[in-house]
C-alpha cells in the first residue's frame, strides 16, 4: 500500500552561527546557480533579471523551468497556487511574498532533498483525509505523479505559515532538516509537526527559534509516531509555544493541544532520544510539555526535557488530570524520563505522571508558585485512546 499523507489532529535560542552552520551542512553544492524571478506582473517577454523585470508570473512555472540547484526569487505579491518542488531548489521570498493555497493540499511541498524555503508567507492550505491532502503550509514531501515523495536535508527558515487546515510546517518522514526562525501560528491543526506518515522515520532534525502560538486544533510542536518508523534524535530548542489547542471552549470536546508533545498511538516504533531544551510554553490546552504513550510497545527512552520555562498550562485538562499542570506524562508501561533544570511556575501541579513512570532530575527544577511538584497516579487514563 502506498504511503499517504495523514492529517495530524494532535497535533535556549540557538546561536546564529550554529543555525547557519547546520543550514550550510544541510545543502549540497548546487550544480547550477541560475536565478529566476517571479512577480504578478512577470511574463515570458521580460528579461528575468530582477523583480522589476521578472520572467514568470507564477511560482510553479518558475520552478518547472529552473535547473537543479537554481534559485527562484518570489517577489512581493499574492500567488494563488500550490507549489511542488521536484528538484533541488531555493525558494526565496521577498518581503510581501504570499502563497495563498486555498483549496490546495499544501502551499509548498518539498519533494526534492537539499531544498530551501525562506521568506514566504504561506496560508489557507486545505486538509482533506479523503484525498490525502495534508493541508500543510510547508511540508517535506510533495505529490509527484499522484504519489507523495518525501525529502531530507531541507532548510525551512524565516517563513510565516498561518490559517492552514493541517500543520503550519510538516517535517514528515524527513531527516537532517533545519526548521528555524519561522512563525507557524494560528493554523487549524499543529504549528510544527514532526512525524513519519510517509513510511520513513523523522530523525536528526533541528527545530529552533520558531514561534508556534494559537494553533487551535492541536499542539504548538508535535513529535508523533504514526507509522512505526519512528521519530528520534531530534532537537527542539529555543521555541515559543503558547495558547495552543483552545479552539473549543470546554472539555471533553476541546482540542486541548500541548505546547510541545511526544506521542505514539501505535504498538511499535517510538519517539526517543529527542532533546526538548530552552523552550517557552504557557496557557496551552494540555500541559506545556506532554507525553502520551497510548499502547504498550513503542520506544520512548532517552528523551530529555531540560532548561524550559513552563507557565500555567492544562487549561482544558488531560486524562485523569483536571488541574493546571506544567508537564504531563502518560505511559501504559514502565518508563524513565529526565525532567531537569526547568522553571515551572503558576501551576497547581508541576509534573503529573500517570502510569509506571520514573522521573529523574525532578529536584533540579525550579518550582515557582506550584502547589504540588509531582503528582503520580498508578494508571494512565489515556491508555488505548
Image (cartoon, grey):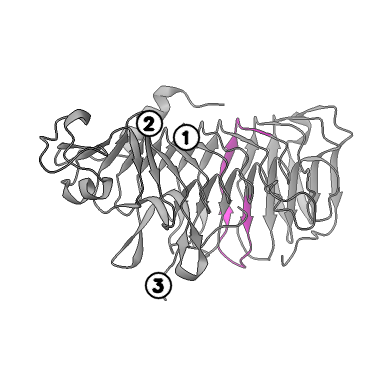
Task: Determine which quarter of the picture holds residue 49.
Answer: top left
How many angstroms separate mark 2 from mark 3 (CA)? 38 Å
Name the residue beneath numbered marker 3: 2
Task: Examine the rendered structure and indicate whether residue 71 appears above or below residue 88.
Answer: above
How many angstroms separate mark 2 from mark 1 (CA)? 15 Å
Label 2 crowd bin: few (<14), some (14–19), many (20+), radius 10 Å:
some
Name the residue beneath numbered marker 1: 182
Task: Examine the rendered structure and indicate whether residue 56 appears above or below residue 128.
Answer: above
Name the residue beneath numbered marker 2: 96
Residue 45 in percent (x, y) is at 10, 40
Instruction: Compare marks 1 and 3 and give the one earlier in the sequence.
Output: 3
Q: Nearer the viewer, residue 32 or 36?
A: 36
Residue contact between numbered discs 2 and 3, judged by CB atoms under 8 Å: no
Residue contact between numbered discs 1 and 3, judged by CB atoms under 8 Å: no
Q: Mark 2 or 3, which is nearer the eye?
A: 2
Q: Secondary structure at mark 1?
A: loop
Residue 169 in percent (x, y) is at 47, 46
The stretch in magenta equals 262-281
Amino acid at each position: 500500500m502506498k504511503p499517504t499523507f495523514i492529517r495530524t489532529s494532535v497535533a535556549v535560542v540557538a546561536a546564529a552561527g550554529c543555525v547557519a552552520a547546520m543550514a550550510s551542512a544541510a545543502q549540497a553544492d548546487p550544480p547550477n546557480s541560475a536565478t529566476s524571478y517571479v512577480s504578478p506582473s512577470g511574463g515570458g517577454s521580460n528579461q528575468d533579471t530582477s523583480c522589476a523585470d521578472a520572467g514568470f508570473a507564477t511560482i510553479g512555472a518558475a520552478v518547472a523551468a529552473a535547473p537543479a540547484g537554481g534559485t527562484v526569487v518570489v517577489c512581493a505579491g499574492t500567488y494563488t497556487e500550490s507549489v511542488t518542488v521536484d528538484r533541488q531548489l531555493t525558494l526565496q521570498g521577498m518581503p510581501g511574498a504570499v502563497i495563498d493555497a486555498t483549496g490546495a493540499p499544501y502551499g509548498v511541498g518539498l519533494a526534492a532533498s537539499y531544498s530551501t524555503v525562506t521568506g514566504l508567507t504561506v496560508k489557507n492550505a486545505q486538509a482533506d483525509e479523503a484525498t490525502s491532502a495534508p493541508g500543510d503550509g510547508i511540508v517535506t514531501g510533495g505529490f509527484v505523479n499522484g504519489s507523495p515523495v518525501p525529502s531530507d536535508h531541507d532548510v525551512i527558515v524565516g517563513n510565516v505559515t498561518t490559517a492552514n487546515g493541517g500543520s503550519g510546517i510538516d517535517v514528515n518522514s524527513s531527516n537532517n532538516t533545519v526548521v528555524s526562525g519561522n512563525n507557524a501560528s494560528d493554523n487549524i491543526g499543529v504549528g510544527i509537526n514532526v512525524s513519519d506518515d510517509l513510511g520513513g522515520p523523522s530523525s536528526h532534525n533541528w527545530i529552533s527559534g520558531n514561534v508556534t502560538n494559537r494553533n487551535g486544533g492541536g499542539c504548538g510542536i508535535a513529535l508523533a509516531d504514526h507509522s512505526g518508523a519512528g521519530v528520534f534524535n531530534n532537537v527542539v530548542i529555543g521555541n515559543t509555544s503558547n495558547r495552543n489547542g483552545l479552539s473549543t471552549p470546554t472539555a471533553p470536546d476541546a482540542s486541548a493541544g500541548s505546547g510541545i508533545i511526544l506521542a505514539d498511538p501505535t504498538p511499535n516504533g517510538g519517539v526517543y532520544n529527542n532533546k526538548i531544551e530552552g523552550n517557552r510554553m504557557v496557557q496551552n490546552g494540555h500541559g506545556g510539555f506532554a507525553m502520551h504513550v497510548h499502547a504498550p510497545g513503542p520506544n520512548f527512552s532517552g528523551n530529555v526535557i531540560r532548561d524550559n520555562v513552563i507557565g500555567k498550562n492544562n487549561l482544558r485538562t488531560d486524562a485523569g488530570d483536571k488541574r493546571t499542570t506544567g508537564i504531563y506524562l502518560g505511559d501504559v508501561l514502565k518508563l524513565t524520563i529526565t525532567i531537569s533544570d526547568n522553571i515551572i511556575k503558576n501551576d497547581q501541579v508541576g509534573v503529573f505522571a500517570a502510569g509506571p513512570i520514573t522521573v529523574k532530575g525532578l529536584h533540579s527544577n525550579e518550582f515557582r508558585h506550584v502547589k504540588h511538584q509531582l503528582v503520580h497516579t498508578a494508571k494512565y487514563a489515556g491508555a488505548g485512546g
